């Protein structure tokens, strides 16, 4: 972080924070600057509040060149828009239309705060990708309008998303470290968990386990090459198969690497997996491991799964299982709970892990309108390093900020299988 400064209501940039925290004790950290954009994180003595991307003096209509404007992302994952200046003053209290490249994004009723800041309103999270890839943002009201250039917005919004994830992590850590002072009940504390997914479409759709994104207050994804995490939402789930599709609110930094698929799995074939186990303790860039298909069914002959010997740890859930040609044959879902088995039978199992069969995953994707990619016939096997790079390029880190119940965690510890 480059500098720390107190919020000053007279500064056009920092005054945007007034929407989040008008208290003078709030402080902002500049975490990123480029192409006229500045991304700041806001924290106060009591809580983490959010992040903002500010750009000033970019308006082209209605003599509003003195306007400073920007996007705000709250710790709850909401996106908002605010501005200050002559154009903002003229729009306050009116019904305005927000457009990106002449496509209507939202209708809002801006309100002006006593400090001069005009809150344009919340933005639809599902349309932030259109904002990131747009050329201009226009506010139109009766007898007035203002147009702002979106040059550099994609990078700025990506930086805001990364900042917001960091804020949510800080909020989760702060909540977890707060001592329990007693009382009849205790509320679940926000926690950050991580899992794995991988790209299944050129549009950037990501496949993972349903349990990776279940109950999340907010979700963020980060693929190889992304400068920062991007907020995301769940597009579809199948609880029975334990599968989910996740879509980012903004596009990835580069075209997604989509892995090809194979419907059948053979007993004894060599496989490889990639994921993000023990995030914060192991390599943040992900880990690559290899093994074999050791059974064509899961526990109690579960026909949705197959068994594999490649090591699986917490955080591997939702990752791809591929053959030597980098064709997906399964999705990592669980590992045998060594402690539960040891308590039950006195022996500690080794490398007994499970994946969802590719045929089940393909059926789920097709029901959601996604066609599984296929390899060219006769594709040659890949070397270990080439296979690892292919998986790394296609894999996605998924972080989930949500509430975890201690009683549920204890119950999970008694099961024979646990999440990877």
Image (tube, rainbow, N blue to C red):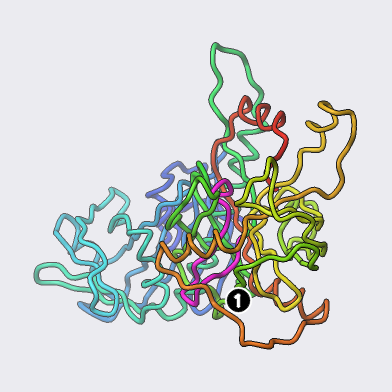
203 displayed left or right of 340: left
Above or below, comparing residue 149 to residue 127 in the picture: below
Q: Nearer the viewer, residue 65 or 311?
A: 311
Farthest top residue?
Answer: 184
Point out residue 263 in the picture as x, y percentages from the top left corner.
60, 69
Farthest left residue?
Answer: 143
Q: Nearer the viewer, residue 11 or 88?
A: 88
> Which region of the structure is painted magenta?
197-212
Q: Quadrant of residue 265?
A: bottom right
Identify the residue at image location x=78%, y=31%.
340
- Pointer 1 local density, CA inside 10 Å: few below 14, some 14–19, many at least 20: some
Q: Quadrant of residue 163?
A: bottom right
303 displayed left or right of 335: left
Q: Nearer the viewer, residue 40 or 266?
A: 266
For the N terminus, the quadrant is: bottom right
Q: Is residue 204 magenta?
A: yes
Question: According to the image, label 1 marks what residue?
Answer: 260
Identify the residue at image location x=62%, y=65%.
396
Identify the residue at image location x=81%, y=58%.
310
Q: How many marks?
A: 1
> Could you say whether the residue bearing mark 1 is in a helix, strand or loop?
strand
Q: Is residue 203 magenta?
A: yes
Above or below, comparing residue 235 to residue 212 in the picture: below
Above or below, comparing residue 100 to residue 159 in the picture: below
Point out residue 95 in the picture as x, y percentages from the top left corner.
14, 59
Point out residue 348 in the picture as x, y percentages from the top left corner.
88, 37
Identify the residue at image location x=54%, y=16%.
185
């Amino acid at each position: 972080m480059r500098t720390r400064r107190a919020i000053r209501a007279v500064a056009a940039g920092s005054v945007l924070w007034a929407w989040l925290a008008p208290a003078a004790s709030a402080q902002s950290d500049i975490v990123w600057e480029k192409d006229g954009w500045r991304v700041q994180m806001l924290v106060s003595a009591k809580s983490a509040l959010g992040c903002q991307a500010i750009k000033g003096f970019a308006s082209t209509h209605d003599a509003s060149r003195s306007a400073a404007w920007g996007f705000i992302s709250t710790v709850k994952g909401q996106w908002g828009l605010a501005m200050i200046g002559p154009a903002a003053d003229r729009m306050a209290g009116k019904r305005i239309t927000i457009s990106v490249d002449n496509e209507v994004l939202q209708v809002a009723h801006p309100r002006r705060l006593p400090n001069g800041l005009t809150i344009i309103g919340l933005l639809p999270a599902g349309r932030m990708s259109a904002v990131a890839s747009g050329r201009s943002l226009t506010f139109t009201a009766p007898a007035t309008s203002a147009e702002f250039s979106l040059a550099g917005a994609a990078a700025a919004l990506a930086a805001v998303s990364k900042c917001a994830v960091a804020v949510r992590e800080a909020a989760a850590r702060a909540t977890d470290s707060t001592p329990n002072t007693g009382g009849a009940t205790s509320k679940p504390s926000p926690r950050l968990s991580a899992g794995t997914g991988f790209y299944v479409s050129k549009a950037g759709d990501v496949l993972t386990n349903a349990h990776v994104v279940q109950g999340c207050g907010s979700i963020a994804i980060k693929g190889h090459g992304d400068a920062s995490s991007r907020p995301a939402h769940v597009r579809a789930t199948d609880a029975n198969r334990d599968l989910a599709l996740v879509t980012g609110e903004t596009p990835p930094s580069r075209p997604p690497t989509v892995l090809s698929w194979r419907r059948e799995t053979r007993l004894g074939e060599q496989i490889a997996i990639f994921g993000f186990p023990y995030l914060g303790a192991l390599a943040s860039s992900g880990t690559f491991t290899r093994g074999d298909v050791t059974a064509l069914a899961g526990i109690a002959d579960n026909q949705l799964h197959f068994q594999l010997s490649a090591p699986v740890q917490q955080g591997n859930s939702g990752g791809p299982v591929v053959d030597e040609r980098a064709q997906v044959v399964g999705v990592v879902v669980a590992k045998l709970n060594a402690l539960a088995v040891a308590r039950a039978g006195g022996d500690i199992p080794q490398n007994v892990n499970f994946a969802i069969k590719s045929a089940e995953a393909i059926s789920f994707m097709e029901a959601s309108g996604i066609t599984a990619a296929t390899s060219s016939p006769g594709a040659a096997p890949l070397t270990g390093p080439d296979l690892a790079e292919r998986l790394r390029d296609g894999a996605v880190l998924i972080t989930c900020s949500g509430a975890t119940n201690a009683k549920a965690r204890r119950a999970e510890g008694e099961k024979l299988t646990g999440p990877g």
